[in-house]
Amino acid sequence: MVPDFSRMPSTPAVINTAEPIGLFEWWRHSVGQGGINLLPPPQRVIDAMRKLRPRLIRIFIQQFFDIYPRRGTFNWERLDPFMDALAETGANVLASITIKPPPLFPAVDQKVWRPTDPAEWQNVIAHLVKRYSVDRAIVSHWGIGNETDIGENGGCPYLIADPADFCEYYALTAKPILETFPNAKIGGPSASNGRHALIAGLLDHCGRTGLPLDFIAWNIYSNDPAAHADLARYNAAIALKTGGTPPETVITEWNKCPSAWSNPPVSVEEQAFASQRAVAAAMILLSYIRAGASWTFYYHLWDQAAYEKEFAAFFKDPYLMARHWNELPHRLGLFGVGGEVRPQYFVFWMLSHLGNELLHLSDENAALPMIAARGDDSVAAMLVNPAEDKIVNCEFTGLRPGPRALTVYRIDNDRRWNAETCELIPIEQRVVDGIDGSIRFQVWAPGKSVVMVRLGKA
């Protein structure tokens, strides 16, 4: 049934292409992977990620990689394929250290964070860093810990909620990283609660002692884009108070909030393909861009199954992971377990195709969340419609005279993409021309859709 377009409300989208406001570093908004099992992403997923031209991807180096099974013995057979696959994307890696080698942590207890032999722990970390930052130039950033404020409930084996304890653990681990690879960027704690005292405590400790801290990190799952932006601004503000050059603000995991982490009412495959998920991701990304976050990592790239045997070796409650990822999975990935591309992937695809100079947007565009940028020979805008159907009156001003090739893409519930090539299929392609450097046209933005309009060479 064809909608009655004449009855739809309209809204403006005015883009002045002559008013750049700075570089658009879209690559600062990337993805994370891992923490669920040791399998590397399949080639199909790696190839699709390469198309987004990422510069940094965040991962967990989890205990199931078992890199130090026995005293004096290193085993890279599990971790090498995982790291090599990520290197194929062309990106560097931010690797969060969440290992508990059995020789140094013989008891399975999340509250135990001190290794039995601190010097041996530092030797293990030095070997890890040498392999993936020195011998193989893969890891440029090392994160120390992940969600230690909640321990196993955050998918990692450490529970270190006291800032003093975490600072001791951070210092112990940072030393061999920097001795082995002085150019490393280091930080933490990737707290589950972005306002946790761990962050302020780490900032204070490093400020007083001179211990390097290149970035502070946290994770957030919320449906409210403002909550994401507010937390980014909050932590940027407390980082400024330390004096000197403030550390970067890094959101190591973000996503919308599943209906209930511990007891979701329903999880079926069809939910993963709802365009609302792309809308939620786009709205949150826009909030981070406006808040000036240094790096953000959507969690996650590829959905996986959790295997009980892998977690039973270092988790008291391995069922916790099975419930989250097997029984009622959250289906957060840009790709499904079988490599099926999801709508959210194309939000990142759009961002990477906008251009490299951010454009000013006037207040008259407030009714429709959007972002616009220009490249060497194109201008483009991404428009997000979280509400009812709209007709968008697009106007690009400040253009050099001459015709343009107009291309319109849309993420909606009709899956307007090629699932094999992971490319959006244009819904409109035509040549347009304007008067006095302005080009006007209309596009339909269905409710809960993301639209990209692009003017390129005719």
Image (cartoon, rainbow, N blue to C red):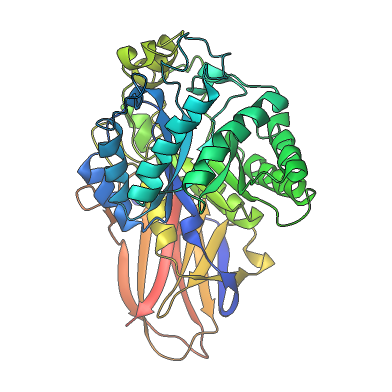
Q: Is residue 402 above or below residue 66?
A: below
Q: Which quarter of the image is occupied by the C terminus?
A: bottom left
Q: How many numbered discs, if any?
A: 0
Which residue appears at 38% of the width and 21% of the height? 325
Q: Is residue 255 above or below residue 7?
A: above
Which residue appears at 55% of the width and 59% of the height? 370
Side of 270 relative to 154 (left or right) = left
User: What is the quadrant of residue 67 in the picture?
Assistant: top left
Which residue appears at 40% of the width and 85% of the height? 433
Side of 43 relative to 444 (left or right) = left
Task: Give x and y (percent) for residue 453.
Answer: 42, 66
Task: Give x and y (percent) for residue 126.
Answer: 45, 37
Instruction: Examine the rendering and report whether any part of residue 223 can be seen.
Output: no
Say which of 47 and 438 sits in front. 47
Instruction: Examine the rendering and report whether any part of residue 285 can be seen.
Output: yes
User: What is the quadrant of residue 170 in the picture?
Assistant: top right
Say which of 325 and 413 sits in front. 325
Task: Give x and y (percent) for residue 23.
Answer: 55, 70
User: What is the quadrant of residue 73 in the picture?
Assistant: top left
Task: Give x and y (percent) for residue 13.
Answer: 55, 67
Q: Is residue 237 above or below residue 224?
A: below
Q: Is residue 185 above or below residue 118?
A: below
Side of 9 relative to 457 (left or right) = right
